[in-house]
Image (tube, helix red, strand yellow):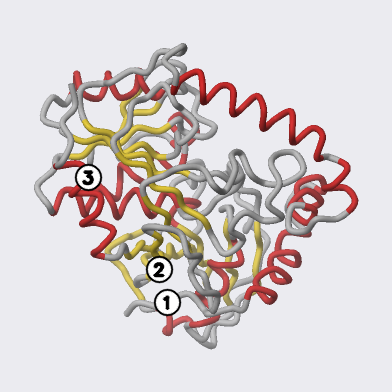
Amino acid sequence: MRAKPYPLHIADATSDAKAVHADFKPPIENFLAHQWRRRGPIAWALTPFACIFGAIAATRRSFYELGWFKRIDVGVLVVVVGNVTIGGTGKTPTVIALVEALRATGFQPGVVSRGYGAKVKQPTSVTPTSAANTVGDEPLLIARRTHAPVYVCPDRVAAAQALIQAHPNVDVIVSDDGLQHYRLVRAFELVVFDDRLGGNGFLLPAGSLREPMSRRRDATLINNPYDRALPPWPNTFELDLESGDAWLLDDPSVRRPLDQFVGEKVIAAAGIGSPERFFATLRAAGIMPTTRAFPDHHSYRDNPFETVQADAILVTEKDAVKFEAWRDARIWVVPVEAVLRPRLIALVVEKLRGRTST
């Protein structure tokens, strides 16, 4: 059984986000997230700094476009999945789905990532048995879900080169984030937004944008647009995230459809970019959980549920890869899959097959 995310209206999603994040996110993070949703006095006061940020970013990009800064072709085609905003938008599920789609069309994909919080400075291979606190939670999740070669490094060019050297059969690399890593030559750029789109439309620090909304790209994905019409941009597609049966962390072979948790005392916890979306998915399945939202990439060094009274604790896959130092028999993991439109997959494949790397 698969459950689609609950179709919250934009206003509901925003208010839910405020309530969920208030208790667990740092005050400054809550404050900025609120300011970046509107053009209030503080956002306007920060616009001079946004202009400076924009000028620096535009200059840096133009230096690469003019050839004053060298771009590196790693020898295989590269697809970048990234965003122009701060915060999670659904890139990791998209990367997983894109890797599987490319493999189904005959490619041999690999993945590179910076690895948020990764304790590596040199290109490092990520395997299903790697430690999340060493290689990062998202690369580890990608490696476990796709079984594709995955390398992490702050320098994505170095990561890609190391991956190709170790896996010469790889003929396309998917970069998890790295849209602003201009040094890496890419064949296709896919920008992912969620329902917030560009927020108030201002660049950092007045808004959430790293680059203008008008930034050139090959395609755009909108994650859970609810009842909002898709923007009239070229090659814009809707992204659906669908949840599957929950599996028991202590024994992944044990699975339960989400509707079997209805009526139980359930805690739902998430340390992802948009926890409220995960909670809404559970409510759509009829579950009425007590929710706990943690900051994105929360470490979970200690068991935060030790004193919690619950029949079951439902968490995301991204959180579960970090539950290494402790165990809790009540934890069930809810997998999420990104559903890519066939037209988008065809667009990526057509672009890749129409180009050859030097």
Judging by the rendered image, the residue that carries numbered circle 3 is 351
User: Where is 8 relative to 185, above or below?
Assistant: below
Between discs 1 and 2, the one toward the N terminus = 1
Mark 3 or mark 1: name the one nearer the start of the chain: 1
Question: Residue 120: where, in percent of width, then height?
Answer: 46, 21
Q: How far apart are marks 3 and 1 (CA)?
A: 30 Å
Does residue 229 appear left or right of residue 146 in this picture? right
Q: Which of marks 3 and 1 is in front?
A: 3
Label 1 secondary element: loop
Q: Report the residue at 21% width, 54% height from top.
A: 101
Q: What element carries label 3?
A: helix
Q: Which of marks 2 and 3 is in front?
A: 3
Q: Is residue 340 above or below residue 354?
A: below
Q: How crowded is mark 3: few (under 14 residues within 10 Å), some or many (20 or more)?
A: some
Residue that label 2 marks = 240
- Which of 245/13 is in front? 13
Q: Which residue is drawn at 51% across and 67% down?
A: 314
Label pair 1/2, CB-CB below 8 angstroms: yes
Q: Estimate the spatial distance between the alpha carbons at disc 2 and disc 3, rounded to whole Å.
A: 23 Å
Q: What residue type is labelled 1?
A: Lys
- Give the residue type that dot 2 points to: Asp
- Could you say where residue 279 lies in the image, as x and y percent from the top left? 57, 70
At label 3, the amino acid type is Lys
Circles 3 and 1: CB atoms closer than 8 Å? no
Q: Residue at x 29, y 50 (%)?
A: 145
Numbered disc 2: secondary structure: strand
